[in-house]
Image (cartoon, rainbow, N blue to C red):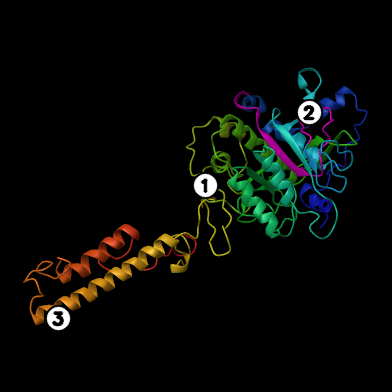
Amino acid sequence: MGFTRTLRAVGGVAAAGVLLFTAAPAASADYIRDGQWALDAFNPQKVWKESTGKNVTVAVIDSGVNGDHVDLKGNVLPGKSFADEGGTADHESGDDHGTAMAALIAGHGHGPHHADGIMGLAPDAKILPIKTNDKIGGNANSIDGPLRYAVDHGAKVINMSFVTPRLDEGEKEAISYAIKKDVLLVGGSGNEGSSKPLYPAAAPGVLGVGAVGKDGTVLGLSNYGPHIRLIAPGEKIYSAGTSLKYRQASGTSDSTAYVSAAAALVRSKFPKLTAGQVANRLTKTAITPEGKTGITSPDPKYGYGVIRPYRALSEDIPAGAKNGPLTMPKEDSRSPAGAGTDAGADTDAPGHGASAGVGSLSPLVVIGIAFGVVVVLGVVVGVVVAQKKRRKGPPPGGPGFGGPYGWSGVPPQQQFGAYPQQFGSSQQPGSNPGAYPSAPPTRPPGQ
């Protein structure tokens, strides 16, 4: 699937086409700002008293960004193009999708008091544009390189308003790389109105986003499923364009950009929070279309609810677990994935694997077990020899050589109770006291 077509699957149909405002007068520019119903719904003036996204870089992996747009100028870094022409990704003059996403995140408007044009939810954030290859077939559209570039160039949030049916191993590894570097990945669920999982939104470790309309209900085109964590406005969203000045569209691309912007706001105000803890603030303060808050498990349609940036910034919310509501990717094919799994933990370590055995133990533990076996066998041999010697009389040198119970000085019944118990308690927590330590305890799958 070509990347442009992939974007269209998320970006949605331009509800009213691209708006022809190339030579628009000031009144039309004001109309664009007035038409930003989604921004108004967030009560931005209150939000910006808490955070404007300053000192946070949001990578936009997309079709490139027009950094010269009047509503974006100064907020767009050079970035990189992975397309054939190479170079930077900040002078896109064709496809306007990436520019639209960037503007919803970090647009600053223009004119007196920046009152005209598109204002993003995090107007002081910086955009790192990354253009992908638009060729069809092969690995041309792989997001492996773009993801790693974003992480290595300072992005703390990565916006991915695109979908693909599957991820290759390199892309999965790149997602894991970003997670281990504490970068929050935000992905749009797609616009097929189905429960079919599409990626990267459905990938473990990614914050999957759906779209909600003006009436507060989930859009019929918004894909759904257990991977959805949040929803945000995605109906008739005004934003910036490239060759044409503004556009209006509907889809989960736009809602994804708003979630990325909200994440940038939180990361700016709470720089010590992990990516998962940022997601935790967003989900803990979200509200469902039915008015529910603080639900314990995500609904397939609306996840934990619609983002409420002001509450995410202002409420007293415990930091929570490192990974928050994110489901972490498997360390490898043998280890089960589960919500809250530490991405940096070795899930195949003793006691963590679904069916851990001796083969999964560390060399030191194996050596310790082998040593224990040798010692116990030595004790057995010693006892047998001692008993035979007692039957034949004391050894040369007089009775009691080595103590009344032979060479060990410990009664035989204590030898077979004490030593294995000590070994088990010190080396293998959970092993049966008084018995030779068994293989590490296993967990039921999914725990």
Task: Give residue 393's position: percent from left, percent from top.
Answer: 7, 79
The circle on residue 388 is 3
User: In the rendered structure, which amino acid carries the disc numbered 3?
Assistant: Lys
Q: Name the residue furthest right.
A: 23
| Cβ atoms under marks 1 and 2 closer than 8 Å | no
Residue 128 included in the magenta stretch of the image: no
The circle on residue 295 is 1
Residue 68 included in the magenta stretch of the image: yes
Whether residue 429 appears in this view of the structure is: no
Q: Main secondary structure of the magenta part?
A: loop
Of tags 1 and 3, the one toward the viewer is 3
Pointer 2 or 3: first along the chain: 2
Above or below 220: residue 264 = above
- Quarter-of-image position of residue 62: top right
How many angstroms separate mark 1 from mark 3 (CA)?
A: 72 Å
Pointer 1 or 3: first along the chain: 1
- Mark 2 neighbour density, 10 Å: few (under 14) some (14–19) many (20 or more): some
Question: Which image quarter holds the N terminus?
Answer: bottom right
- Quarter-of-image position of residue 232: top right
